[in-house]
Amino acid sequence: MKLEKENIIVERSYKKVYKCEEGIVKVFENNHPKSNVFNEALNQVRAEETGLDVAKVISVSQVDGKWALLLEYKEGKTLAELMKENPGKLEEYMEKFVDLQLEIHSKKAPLMNKLKDKLTRQINGLNVLDATQKYELLTRLDGMPKHTKVCHGDFNPTNVIVAEDGTMTVVDWAHATQGNAGADAAMTYLLFALKDQNTADLYLKLFCKKTDTAKQYVEKWLPIVAAAQLEKENALEKDFLMKWVDVCEYQ
């Protein structure tokens, strides 16, 4: 497998993503846990087994001593690129985006990790919140309905590839779990709100309309998922996320 620097399509602190002859290769830094690499591959396979259109896993191997995940290449543009290129079609694209998320939520994958367990672990591990804040968040989490729907965990337009014929493929299943769709929607809302509040509001309006869900129900998840995201220790996002945790009126 030949990987050239000029073929890098995504670069993060913990990984580089290349386009090569065999497909898409994610090469993870040595400080990225090996278990996370295998868990991502497993999530991708389990998502594939539900019948969803996802990039298929080809192999998990090592490249220059680093763990790497080789995935099927899907031709097309990201939905984020299309939204930027065609601002007048934002609502049309958002409709399709929400419909795709609802298709994901309609699936079951009994062997996926449970969302509630993941959120609990993330909140318990935070140093930026005190014991009282953690207790209040975990009490709220414990009181939320327990579901077993497939949740992508990072569902945003950069993770949707749109082919020329309009077929949409969902990529990057590293954070996938089974749990409550309201929590998944709250995460997507936060990802939009981080960049543009109006787009976030449009998303939430459409999600609630299509699922006949009260806006307040999704909003009740916001402090929980915002707190869990603090685990990533991204300085640019910390202040934004803390606002969502702080504005919460605990019941």
Image (cartoon, helix red, strand yellow):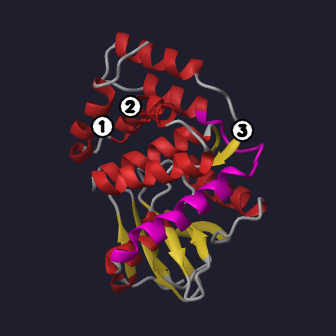
Q: Is residue 34 visible?
A: no
**Disc 2 and disc 1 in contact, CB within 8 angstroms:** yes
In screen coordinates, is 79 left or right of 101? left
Q: Position of residue 5 (x, y in %)?
A: 34, 82
Kind of residue indicated by mark 1: Leu
Kind of residue indicated by mark 2: Ala
237 or 80, which is in the foreground?
Answer: 80
Q: Position of residue 88 (x, y in %)?
A: 34, 76
Upstream in sequence: badge 1 or badge 3: 3
In screen coordinates, is 34 left or right of 130? right
Give residue 241's mark: 1
**Residue placed under numbered mark 3 in the picture:** 148
For the N terminus, give its image quadrant.
bottom right
Measure how far apart labels 2 and 1 are at the Cα level: 7 Å
6 or 52, which is in the foreground?
Answer: 52
Q: Majority secondary structure of the magenta segment?
A: helix
Q: How crowded is mark 2: few (under 14 residues within 10 Å), some or many (20 or more)?
A: many
Give residue 227's mark: 2
What is the secondary structure assignment of the residue under circle 3? loop
Upstream in sequence: badge 2 or badge 1: 2
Upstream in sequence: badge 2 or badge 3: 3
Q: Residues within 10 Å of mark 1 (few under 14, many from 20)?
A: many
Range of magenta residues: 88-115
Kind of residue indicated by mark 3: Thr
Residue 131 colored in magenta in the image: no
Measure how far apart labels 1 and 3 are at the Cα level: 26 Å
